[in-house]
């Protein structure tokens, strides 16, 4: 029943928040719900990651292996960060007249439903139901992207829905083709979309159908994952959403879509198609990294810059899965964890800066370390962390992927990988330095009072720093187990 409760708690928390008579009670109920979701998620994920075996419930409808468990842990951790941080952030939005106070409880409803849809995505065994869950994440998160009802946010929400719905249509076609491949291999009565059954049948799946199916899956779910050139919705949606929502979109939602791609990649890798999916992942990963470079370097809006950074990092993970091999896949999975924590923290920091400076334009944000000592310091640390600078954890994960590429003799992809991350490092360091260390405008007051919520941005920063210095044996073994699932060993 642990899985059932994991899925029920966010639904109940959202409903309770929406039914609350005032917004303070709504926030309290939301905070309790997110804490319980965090605890329930860890009760599900940690035993599986520790090697207790696969968890199945509801007759096999729900299934959590090491790969699912890793995603569950990331979802509930970043979900708790975003939900708890929403209190102070959204109250400031209300105070500035961004939206009516009475609508705040609906924000908490959609926030928890959003978390539910992501948890559903990574816990169902049926690939058709996974498609339904990923489509549900689009519909619910679009309500959060356009929550302020401002012209720019509504435009971003509609663009998000239209582009991702087209993408998810391609993914549906890929899912149907996968079912057809299973029918050809197993007979009319053997058609299935259960992932475990498809993995077992993968050696006998027809090559042509499997390749065609994966192309549609990669384009479809790749649109939702922010892989270039299907990423065009991402900068608008991430920049216009409330910052806690941006943290969820970038830190978790993109990973859920990548999770869908990886599930199909495992099937293709075990089929006669061999390295077909790995080569496509490598190609789209490098394109995503390369395309992100000029956009990161020329951005004026801090949240749009962070959004394009997410395109780069999804590309890094795709490259890791494309290289394959124990080290590359391990690095990609470690990068998934590091990026989720770091990017979520940076979007929360960006929200703090936007409230203090009343702008997201980086040219107008100066002297942040003087005006907001904690936020300004975290901005600098986050900028170095997200660009893979030592001693942060993203350096370790990027170095693992890069080393695997050189060891495999893939010199051109590895050199391009190194070039892209080096140029983006320079851009981030330049912008973050100007925002944090520039001269403080006279109109901006000094000092900040973050209270207990400061922990929600400080703790993930410390974790990412620690992961660059020391890898806990338990986490290392867990990531090796997840890499084994991805590699089919």
Image (cartoon, rainbow, N blue to C red):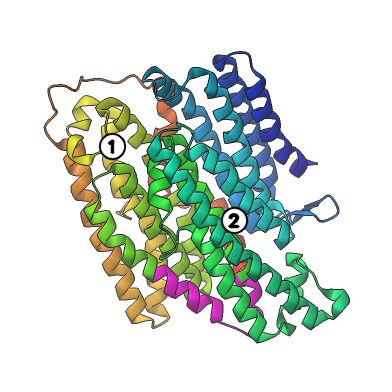
Most frequent secondary structure within the magenta stretch: helix
As drawn, 212 above or below 160: below
* Residue 282, magenta (yes or no): yes
Q: Quadrant of residue 375?
A: top left
Q: Residue at x 59, y 20 (%)?
A: 26
Residue occupying the point 38% across, 70% down = 286
Residue in front for this viewpoint, 486 or 293: 293
Callout 1: 10 Å neighbours few (<14), some, many (20+)? some
**Residue 355 at x, y percent in the picture:** 32, 27
Q: Residue at x 59, y 42 (%)?
A: 140
Q: Position of residue 210 (x, y in %)?
A: 65, 79
Q: Is residue 372 left or right of residue 99?
A: left
- Compared to residue 95, the image places residue 124 above or below, namely below
Left or right side of 312 for 473 = right
Kindly identify which residue carries mark 1. Answer: 360
Expressed as whole percent of the image width and height from the top left, the position of residue 455 reads 43, 29
The numbered disc on residue 31 is none
- Asked if residue 488 can be seen in this view, the reply is no
Q: Nearer the viewer, residue 361 or 97?
A: 97
Which residue is denoted by mark 2 in the rendering? Answer: 478
Crowd class of label 2 (few under 14; some 14 to 19; many from 20; radius 10 Å):
many
Q: Can you say which quadrant of the picture contains the C terminus?
A: bottom right
| Residue numbers of the magenta segment | 265-286
| Secondary structure found at label 1 | loop
The answer to which of marks 2 and 1 sits earlier in the sequence is 1
């Amino acid at each position: 029943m642990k899985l059932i409760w994991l899925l029920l708690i966010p639904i109940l928390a959202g409903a309770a928040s929406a039914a609350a008579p005032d917004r303070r009670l709504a926030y309290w109920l939301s905070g309790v719900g997110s804490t319980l979701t965090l605890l329930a998620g860890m009760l599900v994920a940690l035993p599986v990651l520790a090697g207790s075996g696969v968890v199945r419930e509801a007759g096999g409808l729900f299934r959590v292996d090491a790969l699912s468990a890793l995603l569950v842990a990331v979802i509930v951790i970043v979900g708790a960060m975003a939900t708890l941080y929403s209190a102070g952030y959204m109250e400031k939005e209300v105070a500035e007249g961004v939206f009516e106070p009475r609508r705040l409880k609906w924000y908490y409803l959609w926030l928890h439903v959003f978390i539910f849809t992501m948890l559903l995505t990574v816990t169902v065994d049926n690939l058709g139901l996974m498609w339904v869950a990923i489509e549900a994440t689009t519909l619910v998160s679009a309500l959060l992207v356009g929550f302020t009802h401002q012209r720019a946010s509504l435009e971003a929400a509609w663009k998000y829905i239209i582009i991702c719905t087209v993408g998810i249509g391609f993914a549906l076609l890929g899912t149907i083709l996968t079912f057809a491949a299973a029918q050809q291999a197993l007979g009319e009565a053997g058609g299935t979309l259960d992932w475990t059954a498809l993995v077992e049948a993968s050696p006998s799946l027809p090559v042509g159908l499997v390749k065609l199916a994966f192309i549609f899956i990669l384009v479809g779910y790749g649109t939702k994952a922010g892989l270039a050139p299907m990423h065009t919705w991402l900068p608008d949606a991430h920049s216009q959403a409330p910052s806690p929502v941006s943290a969820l979109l970038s830190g978790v939602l993109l990973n859920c879509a990548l999770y869908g791609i990886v599930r199909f990649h495992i099937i293709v890798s075990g089929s006669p198609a061999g390295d077909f999916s790995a080569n496509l992942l490598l190609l789209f990963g490098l394109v995503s990294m390369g395309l992100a470079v000029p956009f990161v370097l020329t951005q004026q809006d801090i949240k749009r810059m962070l959004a394009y950074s997410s395109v780069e990092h999804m590309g890094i993970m795709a490259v890791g899965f494309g290289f394959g091999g124990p080290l590359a896949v391990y690095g990609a999975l470690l990068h998934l964890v590091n990026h989720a924590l770091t990017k979520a923290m940076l979007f929360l920091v960006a929200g703090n800066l936007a409230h203090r400076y009343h702008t997201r334009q980086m040219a107008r944000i100066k002297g942040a370390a003087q005006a907001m000592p904690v936020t300004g310091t975290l901005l600098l640390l986050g900028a170095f962390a997200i660009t893979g600078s030592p001693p942060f954890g993203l350096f370790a994960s990027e170095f693992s992927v890069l080393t695997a590429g050189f060891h495999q003799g893939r010199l051109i992809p590895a050199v391009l990988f190194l070039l892209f991350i080096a140029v983006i490092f320079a851009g981030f360091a330049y912008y973050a330095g100007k925002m944090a260390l520039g001269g403080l405008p006279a109109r901006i007051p000094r000092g900040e009072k973050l209270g207990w919520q400061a922990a929600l941005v400080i703790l993930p920063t410390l974790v990412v720093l620690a992961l660059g210095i020391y890898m806990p044996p338990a986490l290392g073994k867990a990531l090796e187990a997840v890499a084994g699932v991805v590699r089919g060993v």
